Image (cartoon, coloured by chain):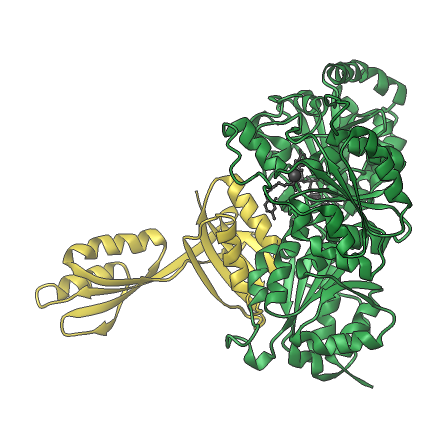
Amino acid sequence: MKHTISVLLQNKPGVLSRVTGLFSGRGFNIESLSVAQTLEPDVSCLTLVTSGEDTIIEQITKQLHKLIDVIKVTDMCEHDNVEREMALIRVKAEAHTRAEVLRIIDIFRGKVIDVGPKSYVVEVTGKASKLQAVIDILRPIGIQEIVRSGTIAMTRAQKS
Amino acid sequence: MKLTGAQAFIKCLEEHGVEVIFGYPGGALIDVYDELMKNDKVHHVLTRHEQAAVHAADAYGRVKGEVGVALVTSGPGATNAVTGIASAYMDSIPLVVFTGQVPTKLIGNDAFQEVDIVGITRPITKHNYLVKDAEELVPIIREAFHLAKTGRPGPVLVDLPKDVLATRITYPEVKPITMRTYKPTYEPHPGQVEKACQAMLKAKKPVIYAGGGVILSNSNEELTELARRLDCPVTMTLMGLGGFPGTDPLSMGMLGMHGTYYANMAVANCDLLIAVGARFDDRVTGRVDAFAPHAEIIHIDVDPSSISKNVRVDIPIVADCKHALVAINAWFARSKDFNAKECAEKHRSWHEQIREWKNKHPLGYVEETDIIKPQFVIQKLHELTGGDAIITTEVGQHQMWTAQFYHFNKPRQWATSGGLGVMGYGFPAAIGAQMAAPDKVVIDIAGDGSIQMNIQELATCRQEKLPVKVAILNNGYLGMVRQWQELFYNKQYSSTVMEVAPDFVKVAEAYGAVGLRATKPSEVEPVIREALKINNTVFMDFVIAREEGVYPMVPAGKATTEMLLV
Ligand SMILES: Cc1cc2nc3c(=O)[nH]c(=O)nc-3n(C[C@H](O)[C@H](O)[C@H](O)COP(=O)(O)OP(=O)(O)OC[C@H]3O[C@@H](n4cnc5c(N)ncnc54)[C@H](O)[C@@H]3O)c2cc1C
Ligand SMILES: Cc1ncc(C[n+]2csc(CCOP(=O)(O)OP(=O)(O)O)c2C)c(N)n1
Ligand SMILES: [Mg+2]
């Protein structure tokens, strides 16, 4: 099963390679990864998506915890959370398809962020499944290039 | 008053009570060596190879129960240290390794004798540091010592650029160490202790499985108290030997691949397995689904990632062994439901069963009159040292025979490379052990292959005037590998025959040490007696039965009950 794991790290040199080295050294897989600063400038948040049986996920979280520079590890699947990913898609946009591309993008609440003579660059954010849906629909029109970010996630506010 | 980085470095070693360090100089470290020569509190042992320096520091730490310290130069000095660091990491040994580094402004430039040792050792250290700013030097060294010895111990590496060692700084005041991200759990959860004790109360066929964590946490007495109180048989891992007296009637010796028949049978049939500071290594479990299949499992370990890593555990206790055992012993001391007599009664048929297994397949070997059996040499060493020597080993058959036949009664009298299994560990380890315990008899039990991996340390022994004894069990083979070839590869002894070997007696003599040789069983005792009398380094070359095997043996991937026996 897929798990999104959020890791708060001390922002020190080499800390990212401690995390990725742990994954490669122990044969855990990383499907996506994103890192950036948090509100505290010396703390970074790393979000990674991985998959494996429960025993593997348990080892992943324990091993991450063991890294000296790691402050906190949260398996987002154990919490009610929101997750987002972003994709930039360069799609063919010629006279007869422009309108259709715009309509599709509109339905998915995407944006055209660059316009060329024969193509658009489109920005879409959402869950991985939504991005996949956009890509599947645009593909017959002609996708020239895709760049996707890693997932980022945040827990929802407590209800009570 | 301002100090240079090199002066502050030494002052910081003194602050941590370091009396002995093991190392090898080089350009990047000249500033430190210059200061070491002026200092009379920190004694530097010059080994003849950086790997040896790290192994020596490792064993020094094991024997003293302190953090070992090694110091090696940049580039090749640092890479030579890697094997030693990896071995200490696998065995959770507290160690701080300092490496020289090129000046900060050259880092990343492929400078002369530059390697990214922090990158190289990331997966084999508990943590590591590159000191980029001289002001950080002392705080980092303090953190390094703190990390090395607390929680699950391990090696920590500190990389010291040459300019940092030359920069003048004000020596910072000693402050308690606070690390936001590092707080090991020492105290057991009372609820888990309660559950564990209830399980112990109920068990009819319990076994204690004690590991290196018992030694590391100095909890052998607490463990012994628990075992005796519960009248519970004890088996130990290779790393746990000495954690419980090996000659005690409750001891079943070592378990696992080369463990005793009865220890493995007891684990396979027990209804409660009490794992204390042990990590369910594959050499111990064999096929995991057949390991303790009928047992409820309690696991005490300070490292949460050890728990349920290889084998599902029913009652985990994340804690220091000592704290947990104290809590468990206290529980039994106040429990009204516990009655020692009843408990012994309840376990009686279990003990009978174990005795039956033991009588059926005791630990043993076929004795011979005209050829020296390796096990016989170990028995004699045990007898003539009163079981009180500090023993180190290399890696191979001789290591397993030592584990089986030198019945360790005390902790910290045993140093072997268990997890990484490094040939070449034992001789430098004996140097470290002798430095830690100058008045003890220290013996490296070696193979003829392994001893050649760090034989140059004869010079170190001589320079430090160490009366280290080396007992070479000389079978003319890389015996452990040969045994696998014999059993599983049609006796194709590919590259395991030592076709060329030195005369070990002459090698010893060339260094000004003493060499002795035994070729017949009747010569074994006189040679050992003679060696123990000599106040010098001695090589004892025992020419042993060449194709003797280590038994019992659990073939790799088999259940521990599927043992090949003598
Ligand atoms: C040729 C060869 C053959 C071998 N055959 C065998 C064999 O037959 N049987 C065998 O047992 N081994 C054998 N070994 C050794 C084996 O590879 C492992 O090194 C060994 O089994 C591990 O011992 P351990 O489980 O006690 O763990 P260790 O490596 O000693 O680890 C200690 C454990 O205790 C924990 N710990 C540390 N400090 C504390 C503390 N303060 N409080 C609580 N917990 C703590 C750690 O987190 C860790 O889980 C062999 C090795 C070689 C080279
Ligand atoms: C550095 C290193 N290289 C290779 C091995 C693999 N290996 C394990 S035991 C062994 C044979 C050791 O031979 P020897 O020292 O003569 O001991 P014996 O088994 O004959 O007692 C070898 C080659 C190892 N453990 N360490
Ligand atoms: Mg040999």
Q: Quadrant of residue B474?
A: top right
Q: Quadrant of residue B198?
A: top right
Q: Is residue B271 left or right of residue A148?
A: right
Answer above or below: position of B56 versus B1.
Answer: above
Q: Is residue B135 left or right of residue A150?
A: right
**Where's the N terminus of chain B, which quadrant?**
bottom right
Q: Nearer the viewer, residue B209 or B9?
A: B9
Q: Nearer the viewer, residue B220 or B471?
A: B471
Residue ID at (65%, 47%): B423
Image spot of residue B308 (x, y percent): 61, 38
Residue B172 appears in the rendering: no
Residue ID at (69%, 44%): B394
Image spot of residue B525 (x, y percent): 85, 33
Q: Quadrant of residue B191?
A: top right
Instruction: State which chain is coloured yellow.
Output: A
Image spot of residue A16 (x, y percent): 52, 63
Q: Colour of chain B?
A: green
Q: Nearer the viewer, residue B519 or B321?
A: B519
Answer above or below: position of A12 versus B520.
Answer: below
Residue ID at (20%, 54%): A137
Q: Is residue B271 left or right of residue B41?
A: left
Residue ID at (56%, 32%): B484
Q: Nearer the viewer, residue B140 or A82?
A: B140
Image spot of residue A120 (x, y percent): 20, 69
